[in-house]
Image (tube, rainbow, N blue to C red):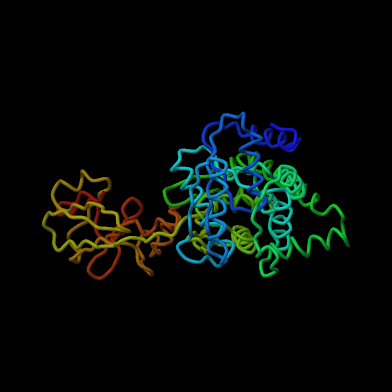
């Protein structure tokens, strides 16, 4: 490393070494000061490392000169004998978010195509300060105040986050580096430009001279706090008896209510995030209030196709899925037979008459006298009641007392007669007015 590269080159080597990766590395180069300084540091300051450098440039088509930027980067790569991968948006991108998403998708594609281990981007300390201030003004939480992470996912690395723009400029001038100026950086149409060119300079001039450094320090503190939360979350969730299924997760309500509402909010957000729902402040508050005062059988929408419901003593959070097909089964007469009822898309075998019903998971015998055919095996309907020794009871109440969660009650079959009277809730209760078991003229039904 030459003297002209000075201490900046050494700091860059230390930053790069922290990621402990070797082999091929993609460097994202837009043509601006930051990315050109990054490429120069990678190519020349890190010439003794075991890396093979690949350059990636993406044309967002957001301004007329973008094609000229791509040609300029191509010329730079030819001069420095570096392989270049060019990408271009299919259509003009109109927002910073769409441009960012397209750019990262392209960088990942290049990384996979070249079998590279890392992608380096030129984000620096000023970008960090601007990002934290932007999110702060929009009311972000602790995670958002963490700003730009040093590493995004398994492959995106930001080795310049400890470097200020002025340092990179001094370095570029010292090594006589050329770069392209983006004319849109002077436009206040974009929020980040307004922060960079007007708001932050005014804050440092009129309010706090060290505002940028304070914002970067706030990001560091926030990331540390977030890491602390992540380390204790497993301990917080252990008493909740969290149970995971294919479509969601459930957890104990009583234990949830024992913890502080702010901690409760954090737990709910983490569980929702695991299902693809990102809760904002309002959504989190609604969820916390619902777990506190909601009643069993009720549900609320959390967004992202995720709902939160209360089922007896548990909170159930899950992705909404189609309940599936229901298809009743008719038993036309007392002769033996078999078939299947379909409840919520699940097929449940049924047999009646003869000996086969006794081999089913659940079976019950009724006196033929008084049975009104055809009998029907179907799912529960609103208003269904069954006559028990203590009087008529709602089927819903019977299932509730048997601790069947509301989300599972539609999966319980009922056997009803031609007049709609419930004869039997397999596994739970049978009506008391249709004869006793083992009667000489009994008619047995088996389900499951």
Q: Give the image quarter of residue 380.
A: bottom left
Q: Position of residue 111 (x, y in %)?
A: 48, 43
Q: How many labels does the image show?
A: 0
Q: 389 and 70: which one is in front?
A: 70
Q: Looking at the image, which residue is at 29% across and 67% down?
A: 421
Q: In this view, does 302 lie to the left or right of 191?
A: left
Q: Where is residue 448 in the image (x, y as percent from the top left)?
A: 26, 49
Measuring from the top left, give residue 195's x and y in whole percent.
Answer: 74, 62
Give the residue drawn at x 64%, y 47%. Answer: 36
The residue furthest left is: 335
Q: Position of residue 242 (x, y in %)?
A: 53, 44
Q: In this view, does 307 lie above or below 263?
A: below
Instruction: Confirm whether residue 221 shows in the render.
Output: no
In this view of the protein, can residue 157 be seen by the observer? yes
Which quadrant of the figure has residue 416? bottom left
Q: In this view, does 384 lie to the left or right of 235?
A: left
Q: Residue at x 30, y 57 (%)?
A: 345
Closer to us: 343 or 152: 152
Where 88 sits versus 85, above or below? below
In the displayed structure image, the side of residue 260 where residue 74 appears, left or right: left
Judge by depth and name the residue closer to the eye, 279 or 153: 153
């Amino acid at each position: 490393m030459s003297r002209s590269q000075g201490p900046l080159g050494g700091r860059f080597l230390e930053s790069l070494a922290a990621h402990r990766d070797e082999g091929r590395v993609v460097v994202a180069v837009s043509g601006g000061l930051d990315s050109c300084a990054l490429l120069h540091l990678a190519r020349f300051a890190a010439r003794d490392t075991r890396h093979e450098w690949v350059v990636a440039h993406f044309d967002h088509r957001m301004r007329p000169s973008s094609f000229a930027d791509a040609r300029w980067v191509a010329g730079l790569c030819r001069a420095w004998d570096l392989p270049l991968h060019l990408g271009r948006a299919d259509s003009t991108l109109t927002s910073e978010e769409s441009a960012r998403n397209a750019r990262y998708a392209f960088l990942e594609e290049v990384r996979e195509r070249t079998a590279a281990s890392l992608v380096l981007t030129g984000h620096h300390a000023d970008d960090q300060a601007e990002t934290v201030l932007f999110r702060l003004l929009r009311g972000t939480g602790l995670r958002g105040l963490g700003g730009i992470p040093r590493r995004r996912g398994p492959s995106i690395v930001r080795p310049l986050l400890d470097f200020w723009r002025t340092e990179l400029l001094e370095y570029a001038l010292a090594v006589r580096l050329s770069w392209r100026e983006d004319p849109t950086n002077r436009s206040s149409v974009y929020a980040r430009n307004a922060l960079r060119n007007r708001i932050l300079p005014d804050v440092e001039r009129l309010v706090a001279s060290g505002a940028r450094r304070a914002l970067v320090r706030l990001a560091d503190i926030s990331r540390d706090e977030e890491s602390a939360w992540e380390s204790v979350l497993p301990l917080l969730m252990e008493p909740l008896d969290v149970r995971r299924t294919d479509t969601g997760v459930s957890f104990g309500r009583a234990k949830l209510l024992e913890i502080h509402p702010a901690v409760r909010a954090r737990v709910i957000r983490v569980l929702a995030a695991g299902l693809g729902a990102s809760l904002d402040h309002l959504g989190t508050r609604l969820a916390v209030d619902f777990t506190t005062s909601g009643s069993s059988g009720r549900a609320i929408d959390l967004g992202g196709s995720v709902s939160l419901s209360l089922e007896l003593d548990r909170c159930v959070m899950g992705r909404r899925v189609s309940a599936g097909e229901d298809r009743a089964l008719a038993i036309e007469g007392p002769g033996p037979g078999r078939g299947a009822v379909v409840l919520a898309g699940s097929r449940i075998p049924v047999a009646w008459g003869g000996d086969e019903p006794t081999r089913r998971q659940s079976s019950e015998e009724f006196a033929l006298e008084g049975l009104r055919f055809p009998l029907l095996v179907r799912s529960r309907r609103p208003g269904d009641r069954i006559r028990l020794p203590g009087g008529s009871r709602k089927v819903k109440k019977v299932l509730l007392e048997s601790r069947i969660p509301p989300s599972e009650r539609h999966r319980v079959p009922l056997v009803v007669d031609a007049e709609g009277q419930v004869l039997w809730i397999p596994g739970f209760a049978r009506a008391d007015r249709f004869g006793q078991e083992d009667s000489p003229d009994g008619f047995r039904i088996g389900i499951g």
